[in-house]
């Protein structure tokens, strides 16, 4: 499966070369050889440190990563042609840098497998993870705009030519904390005081954690101007709370709280209101603030059922086509069929994560795997929902597919943790010897 994933990514690069009229072998050795070497070493690391781990998780990530590299490479060619036509200097290619980030992500993937020899080890550092996660989440807020702001959103830490999005790592650390907290407080949070309209409502004193998480998500929305991270953070919290207690009332309270907070932010803050206005009325603003969304929709429409073919479309017209709008690049050149296939791969990735959650024996492992799997699912929903106008645009990256080092590295850490948990779940259970038996 891993060989197939690497081969498919390499063939996608060949298709890009053929579609753009370049020599078919251009960069094939670099991308194919780099992917093959990196994932080959990662496979050996898995066989050494987690031999019973789910065999599909790494190949699924490799497939998305390889296709993403091909799409980024295709956009590099388009951006270079644009610069040449305008007699501007050729921009630096992003695909080769993404390949470097892939190597860094796989190195960290292997490091996690070696250092975290059992997922229960993370439970010892849950509160440290919470402090570090919140610190990373709010660090861009306190930094000057020149170090943290891009296109009006304060999401980044920029030093020299390096940009890092700390929320990608904060997401993982907070899931670790939530898993530990809910494991310890499960019985308290599951208590109900009264039944209203068929729902078991929790005690008022137990609403404190939800209120704090809701307040933190609103602070992210207001201070960082980032709807995507706010939705992701609060969504992970509420779903993990629902998984812990199995009470629908928590899920409904969470959804109602976020809806109320979003409505209030829309009424009070201009940047939120602008995002909502573009979402509701993009075409009257097609030459202004709605340009990106409208061009993305046109790109998806141009792709149709089977797409224009790799190298045959015009995805570079959409701003940030290799990051926030990589989905429209895939939709235009691979069509509805290709985009659906990619979404099925994401679905399989999430399903394998949830399978690990169901199979592992300890409550902490179950919640940790469920939280990590749902974080991936929610991020995919937020990105695809934004570019297809199902929800307002959020500015998040598509896991493994989009260009971005912090996103890629963070998602490989997620895969490593899921593989560590699945390894524990799939290993034969050694029963303790009977007490005093001969």
Image (spheres, rainbow, N blue to C red):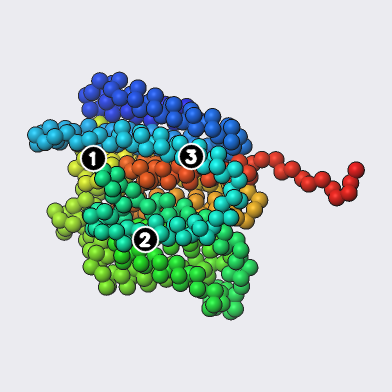
- Towards the viewer: 82 or 150: 150
Task: Quickly name the residue at label 1.
Answer: 315
Task: Quickly name the residue at label 3.
Answer: 109
Identify the residue at horizontal 28%, vertical 33% (top origin). 73
- Towards the viewer: 370 or 103: 103
The single residue placed furthest to the left in the displayed view is: 87
Q: Residues within 10 Å of mark 3 (few under 14, many from 20)?
A: many
C-alpha span from label 3 to label 1: 32 Å
Residue 178 screen position, x and y as percent:
52, 60
Kindly check if marks 3 and 1 are in contact, taking CB atoms under 8 A apart as contact. Answer: no
C-alpha span from label 2 to label 3: 25 Å
Q: Residues within 10 Å of mark 2 (few under 14, many from 20)?
A: many
Identify the residue at horizontal 61%, vertical 63% (top origin). 184
- Towards the viewer: 367 or 312: 367
First in sequence, mark 1 or 2: give its number: 2
Residue 138, labelled with which disc? Answer: 2
Q: Secondary structure at mark 3?
A: helix
Give the answer, above or below, for where 420 lies relative to 253.
Answer: above
Residue 350 screen position, x and y as percent:
49, 47
Q: How many marks?
A: 3
């Amino acid at each position: 499966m891993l060989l197939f994933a690497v081969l498919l990514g390499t063939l996608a690069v060949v298709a890009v070369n053929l579609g753009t009229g370049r020599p078919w072998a251009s960069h094939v050795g670099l991308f194919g050889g780099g992917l093959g070497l990196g994932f080959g070493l990662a496979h050996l690391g898995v066989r050494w440190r987690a031999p019973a781990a789910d065999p599909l998780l790494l190949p699924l990530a490799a497939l998305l990563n390889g296709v993403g590299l091909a799409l980024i490479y295709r956009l590099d060619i388009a951006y270079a042609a644009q610069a040449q036509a305008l007699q501007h200097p050729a921009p630096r290619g992003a695909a080769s840098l993404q390949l470097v980030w892939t190597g860094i992500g796989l190195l960290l993937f292997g490091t996690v497998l070696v250092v975290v020899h059992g997922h229960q080890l993370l439970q010892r550092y849950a509160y440290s993870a919470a402090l570090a996660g919140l610190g990373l989440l709010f660090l861009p807020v306190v930094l000057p705009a020149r170090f943290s702001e891009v296109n009006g959103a304060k999401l980044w830490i920029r030093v020299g030519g390096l940009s890092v999005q700390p929320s990608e790592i904060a997401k993982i650390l907070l899931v670790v904390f939530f898993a530990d907290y809910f494991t310890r407080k499960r019985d308290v949070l599951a208590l109900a005081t009264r039944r209203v309209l068929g729902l078991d409502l929790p005690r008022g004193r137990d609403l404190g954690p939800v209120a704090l998480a809701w307040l933190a998500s609103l602070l992210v929305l207001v201070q960082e101007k980032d709807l995507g991270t706010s939705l992701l953070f609060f969504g992970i919290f509420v779903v993990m709370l629902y998984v812990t207690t199995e009470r629908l009332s928590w899920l409904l309270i969470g959804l109602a709280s976020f809806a109320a907070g979003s409505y209030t932010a829309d009424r009070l803050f201009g940047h939120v209101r602008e995002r909502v206005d573009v979402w509701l009325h993009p075409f009257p603003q097609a030459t202004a603030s709605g340009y990106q969304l409208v061009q993305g929709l046109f790109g998806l429409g141009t792709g149709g059922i089977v797409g224009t073919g790799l190298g045959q479309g015009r995805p570079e017209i959409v701003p940030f086509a290799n990051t926030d709008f990589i989905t429209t690049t895939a939709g235009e050149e691979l069509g509805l069929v290709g985009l659906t296939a990619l979404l099925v791969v994401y679905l399989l990735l999430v399903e394998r994560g949830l399978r690990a959650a169901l199979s592992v024996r300890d409550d902490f492992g179950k919640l940790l795997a469920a939280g990590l799997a749902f974080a991936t699912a929610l991020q995919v929903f937020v990105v695809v929902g934004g570019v297809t106008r199902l929800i307002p645009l959020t500015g998040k990256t598509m896991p493994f597919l989009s260009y971005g080092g912090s996103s890629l590295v963070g998602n490989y850490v997620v895969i490593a943790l899921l593989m560590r948990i699945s390894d524990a779940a799939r290993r034969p259970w050694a029963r303790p010897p009977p007490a005093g038996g001969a």
